[in-house]
Image (cartoon, rainbow, N blue to C red):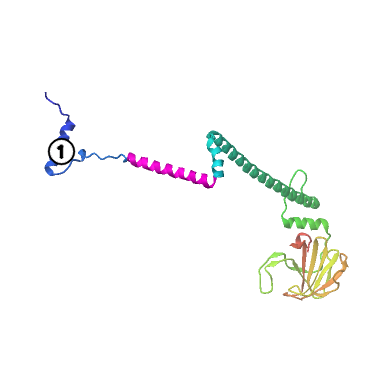
């Protein structure tokens, strides 16, 4: 009987013969086992016996020295543990915790929105009051004024003012080119005049300050509610602190005291400490 050998067997045998002649072993004939070696049976039995003895020894020790511990453990071991119920309870707990966090964030957000609405309403009321006082805007339009515009509108609506002296405006309000004597930011308006020219009160009010200290030289301030007027570089001051002054009353004379480049009156108008451009209120 003729045995039929497949082409692959024929090639394998030819390789084995060639390898034996060369003194090597075919890689195809090597059976490399990739299976993990199993633990011997006796070793496994030995380890299980040791673990069981340790558990038994621990239980015996606790029973001899702490019987109460064993009594407390027995009811727990006797009960069946419902893992599904434990999972549902845990899931319910974390769901409630997440809802509380979301409610807290929602509450904080609502509080912030309420505060923002209150602040917005207060700002709106302030602007409405100024606009109403100044005669600006109406029920059909909303005009938002800057702080400077609000101050000017308030002063015009609440205080009567006149030009405090005669002369020529030599320096306006605001920024200007600075020198060793001239400041960069001019808080008032300068009216050039000869020394001794009469200065009258631009508005009625109470003399809040009379001083000769600082760059303003001899100066005084008259206040009426939130509005103040300041007169600086005077040669003479004819009123005292605390005096009540009527509009147009002579209060001082033009001078050249303090930090100046020549005789003039430095005149300021302010509301609550914020100066405004006198040229927006009076015509010089």
**154, 261: nearer the viewer:** 154
Q: Quadrant of residue 99?
A: top right
Rendered position, 71 above or below 183: above
Could you tell me residue 226's position as x and y percent? 80, 60
- Residue at the (82%, 66%) spot, across then down: 222
- Residue at the (13%, 38%) spot, across then down: 17
**113, 28: nearer the viewer:** 28
Rendered position, 266 above or below 31: below
58 inside magenta stretch: yes
Q: Secondary structure at mark 1?
A: helix
Give the residue number, with chain letter if any, for mark 1.
16
Could you tell me residue 136's position as x and y percent? 77, 50
- Residue at the (88%, 66%) spot, across then down: 244
State the quadrant of the N terminus. Answer: top left
State the quadrant of the C terminus. Answer: bottom right
In the rendered view, does 3 fall on the left or right side of 154?
left
The image shows a total of numbered marks equal to 1
* Residue range (magenta): 40-66
Majority secondary structure in the magenta region: helix
């Amino acid at each position: 009987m003729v045995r039929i050998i497949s082409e692959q067997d024929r090639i394998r045998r030819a390789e084995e013969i060639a390898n034996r002649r060369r003194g090597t072993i075919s890689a195809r004939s090597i059976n490399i086992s990739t299976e993990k070696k199993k633990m011997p049976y006796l070793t496994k039995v030995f380890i299980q016996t040791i673990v069981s003895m340790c558990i038994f020894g621990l239980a015996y020790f606790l029973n001899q020295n702490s019987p109460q511990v064993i009594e407390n453990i027995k009811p727990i071991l006797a009960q069946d543990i419902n893992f599904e119920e434990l999972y549902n309870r845990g899931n319910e707990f974390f769901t409630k915790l997440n809802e509380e966090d979301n409610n807290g964030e929602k509450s904080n957000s609502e509080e912030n929105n309420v505060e923002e609405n209150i602040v917005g309403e207060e700002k709106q009321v302030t602007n409405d009051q100024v606009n109403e006082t100044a005669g600006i805007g109406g029920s059909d339009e909303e005009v938002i004024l800057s702080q400077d515009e609000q101050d000017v509108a308030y002063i015009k609506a609440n205080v009567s003012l006149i030009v405090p002296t005669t002369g020529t405006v030599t320096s306006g309000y605001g920024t200007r080119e600075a020198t060793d004597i001239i400041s960069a930011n001019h808080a008032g308006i300068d009216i050039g005049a000869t020394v001794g020219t009469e200065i009258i009160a631009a508005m009625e009010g109470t003399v809040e300050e009379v001083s000769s200290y600082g760059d303003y030289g001899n100066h005084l301030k008259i206040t009426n509610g939130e509005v103040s007027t300041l007169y600086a570089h005077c040669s003479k001051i004819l009123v005292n602190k605390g005096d009540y002054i009527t509009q147009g009353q002579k209060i001082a004379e033009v001078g050249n005291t303090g930090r100046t480049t020549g005789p003039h009156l430095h005149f300021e108008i302010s509301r609550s400490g914020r100066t405004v451009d006198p040229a927006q209120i009076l015509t010089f």
